[in-house]
Image (tube, grey):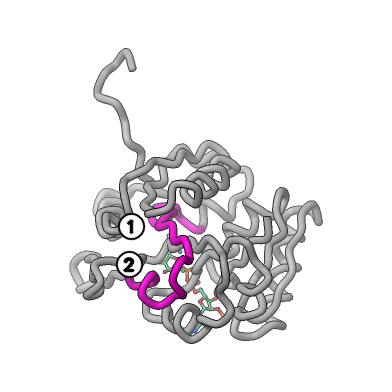
Amino acid sequence: MKIALVGGTGNIGTGFAVRWAANHEIIIGSRKADKAEERAKAVLQILDQEGTAWGTDNDSAIAASDVAVLCVPYDRLTSVTGDLKESYDNQVVISPIVPMNYNGKFFQYCPPAEGSAAQRVKTMLPEGIKIVSAFHTISAAALQAKDWELKADTLMCSDYPEALELVFDLTREIKSLRPIKIGPLAASSLVESLTPMLLNAARKNKIKDAGICIVSERRDA
Ligand SMILES: NC(=O)c1ccc[n+]([C@@H]2O[C@H](COP(=O)([O-])OP(=O)(O)OC[C@H]3O[C@@H](n4cnc5c(N)ncnc54)[C@H](OP(=O)(O)O)[C@@H]3O)[C@@H](O)[C@H]2O)c1
């Protein structure tokens, strides 16, 4: 598959590139094509040149892709969705975006009027684009460490079963990461809001590389 990492020069974009470049064509997007090209070279270096990654501007990356992952901070969302609306055609769009802030005491979830970042994405992209909300609680550092087994779950929401299945498959390519269905896109706030909760847990209890895993209470399960 051709996977565009929109704003993929940053933390989580680099992590996805490291995990998926062996099996897919990774197109790193940026506001500056040369920055994206540099990042693609750096990713291939991490992978000892075993993989496919190249860089370009965000709109060309989206236009060339089957799957586009929105790897920008929430407050930059419009610049890679509404502003580049024309570049989207029939992609599956993955949103790992979490709208949150730190109020001086704890991290808190700050959803937009639409209910969640993923629902806001939906309002800014052409009709029919299949959005999957996923990967919010997966740390970029863990993704970038190419040999790490993640031992975590990633909780996902979508209105499109086939798109969700595709993202399940991409998730399973990341060592030990387990995809978990939560519900339709309207349930995305439940999943996005776990990130500030996790950051608070990590910070206040000194847990390194905290993640989330759903367990069964039954000992024989
Ligand atoms: N970091 C994590 O561990 C993590 C985990 C789960 C989910 N997430 C989510 O993933 C998203 C990206 O997080 P991140 O930590 O990877 O972000 P980041 O490294 O701070 O930024 C990612 C990229 O955003 C682009 N960007 C910055 N300002 C922009 C603007 N005005 N217009 C367009 N693009 C702009 C930059 O790319 P260029 O300068 O190359 O254009 C930058 O490299 C966030 O929404 C976050 O909630 C992050």
- State left or right for residue 152 relative to residue 219: right
Query: x, y (%) of residue 17?
Result: 63, 59
Q: Please state which amino acid type lies under the numbered disc 1.
A: Leu
Q: Residue at x 57, y 71 (%)?
A: 89
Query: x, y (%) of residue 26?
Result: 68, 62
Question: Which residue is nearer to you in this view: 25 or 150?
Answer: 25
Q: Please state which amino acid type lies under the numbered disc 2.
A: Gln
Residue 103 drawn above or below residue 221: below
Question: Which residue is nearer to you in this view: 209 or 186?
Answer: 186
| Residue 185 numbered mark, or none | 1
User: In the rendered image, which quarter is residue 54 located in?
Assistant: bottom right
User: In the rendered image, which quarter is residue 18 located in?
Assistant: bottom right
Residue 197 visible within the image: no
Which corner quadrant holds the C terminus?
A: top left
Q: Secondary structure at mark 2?
A: helix
Residue 140 drawn above or below residue 58: above
The residue where tag 2 is placed is 119
Q: Are marks 1 and 2 in contact (CB under 8 Å)?
A: yes
Query: x, y (%) of residue 172?
Result: 55, 40
Residue 17 drawn above or below residue 178: below
What is the spatial separation of the Cα atoms under label 1 and label 2, in whole angstroms? 7 Å
Magenta-drawn segment: 119-140
* Mark sitting earlier along the chain (1/2): 2
User: In the rendered image, which quarter is residue 42 located in?
Assistant: bottom right
Residue 56 drawn above or below residue 13: below
- State left or right for residue 86 relative to residue 75: right
Query: x, y (%) of residue 147?
Result: 63, 43
